């Protein structure tokens, strides 16, 4: 049953007044940085959603689901950027992952035009923030699912039988997913490109046995300190650039080259203008705030305040 996937292009005049008013309030405040605004509006839409579910009106229940999902997604995104600014980097990373998953679910159920709510733009913005992070490796567990049920009707899901509900599809304002009742861990792998990004390898135990974060988050912090609003768009590109030799003054010429080529420093980058290392380029599409310490302005675009910034991160732990 994939009929729910058919896009709906409803004019607000064709909607009930309450839904039209809520939709207009949402559309007019898409870039609100106030998390309470999003939670309050979500609650109001939730009341309408429950009312249409009680009437078994699937059409308008699904419309309400879209509006409520947009509120929850944008509110969660605002909180994730706030967490970054507070230095809670891993918590923010997990929150960004939840937002990304929810956006994909919304995109797959376009009962309203997702472009109207800037869903593609927000997905690109999340992926840009993820690029500022130093995480490179992730734990990927493999499970054997022994018992699975439908999240809507609780019917058993097996290779031989299943209900009519498809996971990832919304039915009368409820997102369908499969619930794993019983599972067995089969294996654990370490991968660079996981299905889900929650299991980033980012801690180790110190001498006292306490978990400590192994990364510096200078690149994440650098961007966060310069965006005025959570929804200010940025572009992140990683390349390589020569970093000044003085940044590696503690390295011996007869030791490994800091570029990690495996060659001796004296026979590798020492003979170049610097050490060839990963290099992050940031494009702020709106006027940024703060100073440009540890950054170099390499060009301006047509819009006032638009600059391409390059920052040479100096932490080996961050760049590995």
Image (cartoon, rainbow, N blue to C red):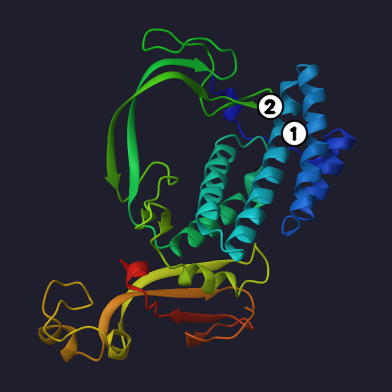
Residue drawn at (39%, 58%), measured in percent from left and top?
135
Q: Quadrant of residue 277?
A: bottom left
- Residue 241 makes an appearance in the image: yes
Left or right of 44 in this view: 240: left
**Residue furthest front as drawn:** 208
Q: Quadrant of the N terminus?
A: top right
Q: Is the Cβ of the residue at disc 1 closer than 8 Å to that at disc 2?
A: yes
Residue, disc 2:
173
Q: Quadrant of residue 216?
A: bottom left
Q: In this picture, is 130 found above or below 104?
A: below
Sooner in the amino-acid sequence: mark 1 or mark 2: 1
Q: Nearer the viewer, residue 177 or 190?
A: 190
Left or right of 149 in this view: 11: right
User: Which label number is shown at residue 64?
Assistant: 1
Tag 1's secondary structure?
Answer: helix
Residue 109 at x, y percent in the picture: 59, 34
Residue drawn at (31%, 90%), measured in percent from left and top?
246
């Amino acid at each position: 049953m994939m009929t729910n996937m058919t896009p709906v292009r409803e004019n607000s005049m064709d909607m009930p007044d309450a839904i039209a008013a809520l939709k207009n309030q949402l559309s007019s405040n898409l870039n609100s940085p106030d998390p309470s605004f999003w939670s309050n509006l979500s609650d109001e839409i939730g009341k309408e959603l429950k009312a249409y579910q009680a009437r078994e009106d699937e059409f308008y229940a699904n419309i309400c689901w879209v509006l409520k999902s947009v509120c929850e997604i944008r509110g969660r995104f605002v909180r994730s950027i706030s967490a970054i600014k507070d230095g809670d980097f891993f918590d923010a990373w997990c929150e960004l992952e939840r937002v990304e998953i929810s956006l994909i679910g919304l995109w797959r159920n376009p009962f309203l035009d997702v472009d109207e709510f800037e869903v593609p733009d927000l997905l690109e913005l999340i992926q840009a923030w993820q690029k500022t992070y130093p995480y490179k490796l992730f734990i990927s567990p493999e499970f054997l699912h022994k018992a699975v049920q439908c999240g809507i009707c609780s019917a058993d899901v097996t290779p031989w039988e299943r209900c009519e509900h498809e996971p990832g599809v919304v039915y009368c304002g409820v997102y369908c997913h499969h619930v794993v009742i019983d599972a067995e861990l089969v294996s654990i792998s370490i991968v660079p490109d996981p299905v889900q990004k929650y299991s980033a390898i980012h801690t180790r135990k110190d001498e006292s046995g306490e978990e400590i974060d192994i990364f510096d988050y200078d690149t994440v912090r650098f961007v966060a300190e310069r965006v005025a609003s959570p929804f200010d768009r940025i572009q992140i590109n990683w390349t390589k650039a020569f970093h000044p030799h003085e940044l590696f003054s503690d390295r011996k010429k007869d030791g490994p080259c800091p570029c990690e080529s495996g060659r001796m420093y004296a026979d590798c980058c020492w003979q170049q203008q610097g050490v060839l290392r990963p290099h992050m380029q940031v494009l702020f599409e709106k006027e940024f705030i703060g100073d440009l310490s540890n950054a170099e302005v390499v060009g301006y675009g047509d819009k006032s305040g638009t600059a391409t910034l390059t920052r040479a991160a100096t932490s080996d732990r961050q760049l590995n």
